[in-house]
Image (cartoon, grey):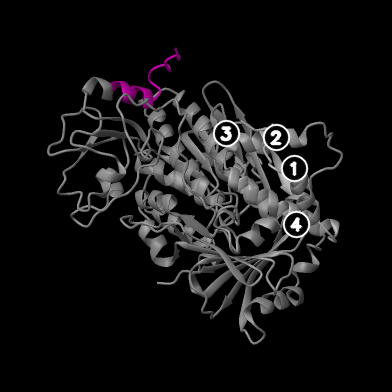
Amino acid sequence: MHVDYQSLRFEYRRSPDQSAAAVARHPVVVVGAGPVGLAVAIDLAQAGQRVLLLDDDRSLSNGSRAICFAKRTLEVFDRLGCGNAMVEKGVTWNLGRVFHRDDPVYSFDLLPEGGHRRPAFINLQQYYVEGFLLERAQALPNIEIRWENKVTGVSQSADAVTLTVETPEGEYCLAADYLVAADGARSPIRKAMGLESKGRSFRDRFLIADVKMKADFPAERWFWFDPPFHPNQSVLLHSQPDGVWRIDFQLGWDADPVAERAPERVIPRVRALLGHDAEFELEWVSIYTFSCLRMERFRHGRVLFAGDSAHGVSPFGARGANSGVQDAENLAWKLALVLRGEAPDALLDSYDSERVAAADENILNSTRSTDFITPKNEASRAFRDAVLDLAKDCAFARRLVNSGRLSLPSTYRNSPLNTPDDDGFEGAMLPGAPALDAPLADGGWLLDRLGGGFTLLHFGDAAPAAQGVRVVNLTPGEDVEGLAARRYDARPGTTYLIRPDQHICARWRRFDPAKLRAALDRATARVPEMAAC
Amino acid sequence: MLNTEPNIASPDDFYEALIALHGNLTPEQSRAVDARLILLLSNHIGDAAVLRQAMARARQGIVPAGHDAVLAARA
């Protein structure tokens, strides 16, 4: 069944809260039905939490926005029950190619090894992502969505946050234990609270055109520096579902953002790339400048900022929507535990520290890419051109070519929730790392088996008797290709404690109930952090 | 550790070759040659600490009089 998600309109419905004698109180209100808000709401609802989701509009996203969804994000969507829909509709890709003028100078395979359920990336228009998430959210009885409910005021006391909400029928007030502000880059909640997101903008303009056409480009990410069809600037080409192609033309700072949007200016640029007899339709055209910025803190008392409201990056690296979904998965389990009284409010501080560190990593990568693509002074231009020239015949220079370092999930190395290793381990699965997938004998996948909730992953013949967690025992026979054991540097008896967001928080060579208890306490902020000595 | 003691066997030959490298080039062309040379030598050295020490010495005593094309962003 084909649904045109861009044209869906949702009805405003009056809520009994609007005529209640006393201000209605909700455990958690999420603002913004974009990918981040929907992901938080679904994750909370799956954890048994009642959620109210408000959106100021009555439609999903339209036009050219996020398109590249990374492996980790797809794994989150799997846990949220809509990964298959995304991957079936999306265009799968793993390979990126970089050209200088006419010459290929560099290519990268983002998933060089097998044994992962999900590809490095799919390309999928944001309206599909929102559509599939929304369908999942609508299937969960404990999520209530209110369209055309715009938050215009926020205040908080020690025990509640109070919202003023504007609707087509006037204003009403709501109270909540916690508010998740997933209300986008211009975040009205951030503004209402007098807060700012700060950073830097790049002196450059980009024309982003989504073009519908039949083309025989492969499903790869193609990036040109100084191509003959668009001299002195860069061009990025990406394939999307429904025969839509994203073309991103660098224009320079002096370009006129209004004139450049006109079809008579856009069409010749597209023709120069595709050839003069190419047949295509323009689906969407816009002119952007890019910034990297973030709020100083993502937690302000009972208000938690997630996604673009909290941080912004340039699009090279696909780190915007992907990091937003990872904010969502980081926040949801913590909020669910705190609301159930199973963890202290201080657990939410770790959302701030972990995701601020992740945002800094994303901003660093995105800034470096943008500095390469948009040199900020004469020397940086000279070095960029020198790198591209040397890349033809010098292998080292290819590694310096930076057309975007594509989104990878952050490892929360310095998280207070991690239990430092006592035992020796090799490999990537250190405390704070997102758990890697591996194929299982029954045709299933390790990450599916882990699911949500705290999980003890034990490698051996029999599961240990652990309390307070779900236990997943992996026998050598189930680990068909031995990939899980290799990726987790596992020997018989090796035990990992994995958080509900599938990040590692502790690991041992042998299961020990007392160590598990201590690690669970630490991972839920139930004990004060040990002072370093 | 960055070696700033004499390390080039025939200093005058080296210096002559370095200047000859830029013979009849425009400032822009020289900039391109220098940039390639720095990248090639940096990769050859490889040692990040040595490279950072060299960068610091190169920048020493120069008070910035230009500005990068970046703008403060606030939202």
From what the image shows, is residue A340 above or below residue A364? Answer: above
Q: Nearer the viewer, mark 3 or mark 4?
A: 4
Label 2 with label 1: CB-CB less than 8 Å:
yes
Q: Nearer the viewer, mark 2 or mark 3?
A: 2
Of callouts 1 and 4, which one flags the residue occurring earlier in the amino acid sequence?
A: 1
Kind of residue at disc 1 = Pro
**Residue tagged 3:** A298
Kind of residue at disc 3 = Phe
**Magenta residues, start to end:** A517-533
Say how many tags the image has: 4
Q: Is residue A529 magenta?
A: yes
Q: Nearer the viewer, mark 1 or mark 4?
A: 1
**In the image, farthest residue toward the left:** A461
Horizontal and vertical percent for residue A271? Answer: 67, 79
Of callouts 2 and 1, which one flags the residue occurring earlier in the amino acid sequence?
A: 2
Horizontal and vertical percent for residue A516? Answer: 27, 25
Q: Is residue A319 magenta?
A: no
Residue A116 horizontal side relative to residue A443, left or right:
right
Q: Which mark is residue B11?
A: 1
Horizontal and vertical percent for residue A70? Answer: 46, 54
Residues under labels 2 and 1: Cα distance?
9 Å
Q: Nearer the viewer, mark 3 or mark 1?
A: 1
* Helix, strand or loop under label 2: loop
Q: Chain of mark 1?
A: B
